[in-house]
Amino acid sequence: MTTIRILFFVHWLRLFEANPHFEQSIFFKRTVDLSKGIEYPFAQECLQVVSDSNNEVGQMMVAFRLASFYVRSERSLELRDIMTERKGQCETFLIFVERMNKVNKMLTSIQTSAKQFFPFTKIYFHFEHQHNSTTDREIMFLLRKFLLNNALFGYVLEYKDNGNELQILTTDLLTNDIRSPVASSLPKELLHPLLDTHSIKKRFRISLFNCPPYTIYLEDDDGTVMMDTMDGLEYRLMHEITKSWKKNFKFRDFTKVKINPYAKILDDLSNESSDMAMCALWLVEDINRNFDLSTFYVNQCLTFLVPKPIKLNEATAIYTTLHSYVWLLFSFFLLLSIFLLNNIAKIEKRLNGSDSVFTDITVTVIETLNTATSHSVVHFPYNQTSVKLVLTSWIFLSFWMGISYTTIYASRLTSPSYEKPINTVKEVIDKELFICNAYFDVSTMEPLRESVHEEYRQLANRSIVYGENFKYRRQMITERRCAIFEVLLRKKYVSLLKLKGDLELVGDLRPMRNCITTHFTGSTEQAMLNKCDVQYQESGIVQKWHSDILRPSQYITTLFDDYPDQYKSTHSITILNVSGAFFLLGIGLLLASLAYVAELVKNRRENDALTLGRMLARNDGLQIRFIY
């Protein structure tokens, strides 16, 4: 369900002093947390809402995402097809009833018989008024009979005021057992007034800053913020709720506050400079003592934007195919085979005189490699170094090609040819990434330094503050050394404010899947839910706003591709895949060519020396004959 975040703070003492009649328009309410008396269903897919309730308790159950509806009359039961609404998924159901006699029709009518409750195994009833009359007791008896006949468990929820606290009493309808009472409300000094929209004050002040998608300041062509053309999820909801108010609204902008704007907004509210705060202030720990949360939330995941895995070089794949231990094992068995073949052949020759080619260590090496790589080289020519180098290169080429087809090809069918994605804090540290912040964020970095987890403390010591030096930040991101704090929205979207001016770098980043911390937004103790919020939620208007705001290429973008072009890569072996083997062959051919040239020079010199020697010998013979 789409989440809306608006926090209200009303300075009720000041308003009471200004308006003597204000006491009639603003009143304290204690929050009844009925969820503490309910055993939550195991199946999480059940936790949806089919509620048309407008009372406070009903709205609280909507906030807890428990299946529920409100019985206004007997007709309201007849018109509901609960099984169709719930699609047979839920285990627990909550029914709000004003008076006991409202359920009498449900127990006897054919249209609202037990068949519509078959998807549910537990039914909780909450009666707004006490059931002490004789008629109520008779209806309670029918209710027990109804549960027994339909194999259902039923409970009645009620609350009792004990002065400083409210207690939840849960009664088992089948056994009349009462569970131990559960304290439900806050102490009196922490209770908050409701927001009164009819107060004498005509100006309504709102503190906020630019925090897509909740509040967004549109900009003109020059990049100047235009406060009169605002947008955002919170802004749209606030505008719809307050459009009938005859008040002048003033926005107090804190976007230019670089260091912890949340704290500045809190100060703005505490010193009575503002009446309302926006921009998701649930991230601040003190809100439970200062604000009334006007709606319900889900959890937000604080994580990192980290470099995307890059595609591995195809040419280097041939060198990284097997693990080092596999290479050692292969080499061990290869040398062992050569040793055994050569020594066994020599032993047999001494024992029975049988001759074998394996008595020659060179032939044994060639034949063993030939068996392992199928290179078909039978023997090395005697005293021909260049030919030996060519044959050696061919043997290594055959060896690498065999490895390619038996391991690389298989690996390309089973795993992507990309680096391992970064999804944990430990992997961020192992990759030697730095936390890139425009300023030192005390609210985030201090908890990391004080964490009980060693990797969190190590991470806190790897922080870089670039300030206004965006060129340095761009360099860090380009060099794949930067991790940027970000909050995931709806498990899919992130804001682009931190990358403003460098949006072309967005494609190089992805969110780390594991959360560093999780902020559970919302409070079970403060459940004064704004009725308008829920109405806009259920009517689908908020969902439409969310879809409009979260359009790609505007303020929000998706960054959830683990691998670029991950569905377009092929797994076939190409010349590039085995270029390393051909590189080895090329080196061998180069060395062979050099050796061949050296042999030519050597042979020519030897031939010249031999010719000279013969000529000298012939001349010496002629001189001897002449003397005689």
Image (cartoon, rainbow, N blue to C red):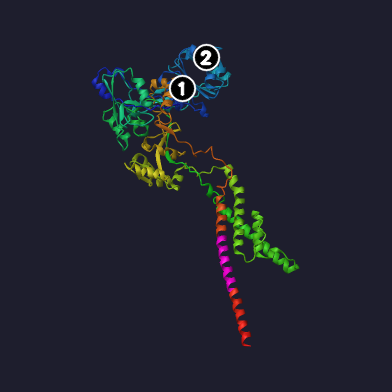
Q: Amino acid at mark 2?
A: Met
The answer to whether residue 283 shows anywhere in this view is: yes
Pick the front one: 175 or 247: 247
Q: Pick out the residue farthest to the left.
A: 18
The answer to whether residue 60 shows anywhere in this view is: no
Q: Pick out the residue farthest to the right.
A: 352
Q: Is residue 439 magenta?
A: no
Q: Is residue 494 above or below residue 595?
A: above
In the rendering, which numbered label is found on residue 180?
A: none
Magenta residues, start to end: 591-609
Q: Is residue 353 toward the left or the right of residue 522 in the image?
A: right
Q: Secondary structure at mark 2?
A: helix
Expressed as whole percent of the image width and height from the top left, the position of residue 82 reads 52, 18
Location of mark 1 (residue): 157
Q: Is residue 594 magenta?
A: yes
Q: Is residue 604 above or below residue 239?
A: below
Estimate how packed mark 2 is, as few (under 14), some (14 to 19) or many (20 or more) residues with alpha carbons within 10 Å: many
Q: Is residue 59 above or below residue 573?
A: above
Location of mark 2 (residue): 106
Q: Quadrant of the N terminus?
A: top left
Expressed as whole percent of the image width and height from the top left, the position of residue 373 reads 64, 54
Give the main secondary structure of the magenta stretch. Answer: helix
Q: Are marks 2 and 1 in contact (CB under 8 Å)?
A: no
Instruction: Identify the residue at image location x=62%, y=82%.
Output: 622
Q: Total marks drawn?
A: 2
Q: Amino acid at mark 1?
A: Leu
Name the image quarter holding residue 192.
top left
